Image: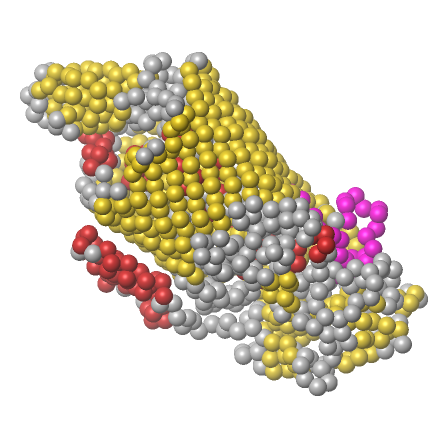
Amino acid sequence: MPKLKLKLLKNKKLKARQGYFYLPAFFIFIDMKRKNILVLLASFMLFASACSDDSEVDSIKPTIDIGFTNAFPNNCDTIYFGESFQLKLRFSDNAELGSYSIDIHNNFDHHSHSTEVSECDLGPVKEPVNPYVLIDDYSIPQGLKAYETNLTISVPATNEGVLLDEGDYHFYISLTDSEGWSVQKGLSIKMLHR
Amino acid sequence: MHKYIILFLCINILSFSAIGQSNCVLEGMVVDQNNQVLPGASLMLYPIKKGGVSDRNGKFEISDLPKDTYVIEISFIGYNTLVDTLIINKNTSYNAQLTVSNLSLSEVLITDNYAEQRKREEALSIEIVSDDDLKKNLGGSLMNSLERLPGVTTINIGSGQSKPVIRGLGFNRVVVVENNIKHEAQQWGSDHGLEIDQYAVDNIEVIKGPASLMYGSDAIGGVINMKNSKLPASDTFGGLVDLTGKSNNELLGTSVSLYGRKGKFFANARATYIDYGDYKVPVDSVDIYSYRAPLYKNHLRNTAGYEKNLHVSLGIAQDGFISKFYVSSVNSKSGFFANAHGLEPRNVDTDLHDKSNRDINYPYQKVNHFKLINTTQYEWKKLKFDLDLGFQRNFRQEWSQYVSHGYMPAVFPDTLAFHSDLEREFEKFVYSGNFKISYQLNEKTEMFFGVNSEFHDNQIDGRGFIIPAYEQFTLGGFALVRNNFSEKSSIQFGIRYDYGQIETTEYQDWFPSPVDENQPTNLQYLLRAENIDRNFSNLSWSLGYTYNAENWSFKANVGKSFRMPIAKELAANGVNYHRFSYEVGNADLSPEKSYQFDAGLEYQSKKLTVGISPFINYFSNYIYLNPTSEHDRLYGNGNQVYYYTESEVIRYGGEIHAYYDLLENIQLGLMGEYVYSEQLSGEKKGFTLPFSPPASAIFSAKYHKSKLGLIKDFYFSVDYRLTASQNEIVPPEKTTDGYQLIKLGLGGNIEMGKQKVNISMQVHNLLNTKYFNHTSFYRLINVPEPGRNFIINISIPFSGYF
């Protein structure tokens, strides 16, 4: 009887999976009828603890590194209106990187918290009038496991002729790999007019 | 135990042929004191221990009786047992009248016999839970109370919201039926709980496996059928007061019900009020990404809530006719963990949030679910008609502080029709109708024909878009034949045809966005969803076999089920605030089709029960929200894009259960479950499905005694749950470690004079273990499950005669 059940597992890869250990054990138990419930309990322990992962799929997330010299921006950094800055981030993945996106939005109401451990000094809460917004997505050349961004982002000083609001902003980076695993980083930054 | 087998054999004996001319037949009828028939009463003749059950017309027949003097015992739960002496020397007719015993309503009707019989009859794998079991296993929500059943898990958010998952399938793949009408709400949302009053449920039947045949689209994963079938005995009245307390979230709940029956008419009313605070987790802080959000006194900030429910039912019952109106209003408000709404670490005003652990601040959800249902049954000769009509309105609002994202204006304009803080609103009207005819063709064959239809009208409002407004119509018809072709075996075959139509309404943003990144001044109001008009049709079928011998029972079922794509799968185009993903529908999806083979094998002896129920299931096109490597530019904050796609999926697994009466008063038990899923095609080939429950087992020991001092039906139980780690994951999930939990239960009935009081106490997570539930919505942001929780439920029944 147990052999019959096990034949369902044509796929070699699946043979080691824990769930089927209990089938043979179960039938042994029936054969013995109520002689020894411990057999069943013990085999079930085996089933529950034998759960090694032998899957061949990619289950590793990519990483965003801002911990190297010249990395920009870092938590609590300042970006100036009317100037451009170099985005310097290092991305890596075990298999293949996907794409990334950048979002800069105001944090005048302190609604966002950075994902970083370090705290930054936030200015007083205020109402936005003409805040700066940037949302964009960027591709990464195909087939790369490591990539360093080399992107120049120019920040305007005005929007429709009006000066953009200075203050606390949130700089949000999202990175994916080709399998769809993703990782995010949210940084607190200041945006000021020089 | 033997009683059930004899009982079962006797049902088959009804198809008797008069063998042995010298032996006699005893036939008759069982009625109550108002001459209303009593179906399901058990009869037993001593000393030969031969018995039977009354059929649905209250009639019974026991054949092949040697001429002798017998003692007959007729019993029915809720009624006094009748014992009489009979001299049988020719074919004899005997009519019995039972009188109501002074028991609480909760003990009437739902009996172990029923559950056992139903399980043996049904070719699909089913579990039946009575309200007593529910009280003994009271969890955070109704669905949590069911989690002890092998094959049933839940998807949770917070302490009071959970959704059923059967063998790894949930959301729109499990149908929830209350009072014969499909419960329809916004089931697609993982953070949306089930709008059902757990005190108002008498018994629950869980069908594990595809049941499209009887329930139509959506029942592809299984059915949770909640019945409110209790009918008060004639000329009685009574009620029940339930009081519940839980230590972890300082929950206080009460539900009071009243019932009465005078002649043909009966009525029932219930009011429930539950209020709970923030739940406590056994950690001081929660790591959201690398940000450590400190928790105040272990409280998961802003997870308090309340529930206020009202139910009224009125009905009439007379010869072969019963009709019942049921009106209910279920209302709840509950908060979301304030630091992580949208899975983005959020600053919170800790002074405001930590002021009280009972207040509900932003973000929160508020839901009203109204139902008006009529169920009518009519029996005429060999025909039985069932008509169910239902109206439902589900009104859901999700509130959070306005935070502009994407190109929403930084300051909310005051020219809009909705409030700035109304994140989303859904208003859904659902009209349902079922009609079923059952026909007893002959003693061996029963036939069923039915039609089900539903119309949905869904409206949306609020600042955020996720699903469009839509109208949906479905109509299905089925035929099912069951044949008991031998004493031990029966076979059933059914076929069903469904037609469905869905029309979604286009949606345009209320704010302009720069569509061309090179021309930032070119602003347009984006059309997020177009008008979609789709028709679907499908033929599903099911073939089942059951075999019941003295110690062994075997069942097998093979069938095809289907599910129509829902509006969200066809037309979603927006940010999921709870996961901060950008979700995009696919208007070209075809109906999901699933083929499943189920089997069940059980051995029962006097002291031991062991059973196994394996299944294997193949989806030709499982509809799945696939996270891609893309990012969205126009909404949210550059979120990762998830597309609805289809892939081939294979799933298999099963459950085991074993009970052993170690001593007269001690029962040992074991329940285990396992599911394996794998995508066989598409972009996530080789990956599992989202929210795959890990393997788990419960070892239990229960001591019970019918009388211990002043306590009747005393029990003390220990459950040791062992859950394996889940390493089979799919983006964006995290692997989850295994865990071990201990749960204690203690209770019984105390009689003070004539008043009976039922007490059930539990301790969940006795050792205050920190563990993560892989199928919890909060798993992704590392929120552990609730810590130690003391639960007490006190039920005080009262009753009397008019």
Residue B704 among those drawn in magenta: no
Where does the image place residue B18, in percent across and percent down from the top left? 12, 24
Q: Residue at x 23, y 32 (%)?
A: B7
Residue at 61%, 82% (x, y): give it.
Answer: A146
Residue A97, given in percent of the width and then of the height, sits at: 60, 77
Can you give x and y, in whole percent of width and height, for residue B730 in the image?
51, 65
Which residue is more in the foreground, A72 or B543? A72
Rendered view: B128 above or below A118: above
- Determine if the magenta segment contains residue B406: yes
Which residue ends up furthest to the front in the rendered image? B709
Query: Main structural element of the magenta stretch: helix, strand or loop?
Result: loop
Q: Tell me the residue at 79%/59% (across/down).
A: A109
Q: Position of residue B285 (x, y in %)?
A: 60, 62
Q: In this rendering, is residue B215 above or below B104?
A: below
Q: Is residue B264 visible?
A: no
Q: Which residues are magenta?
A: B396-420
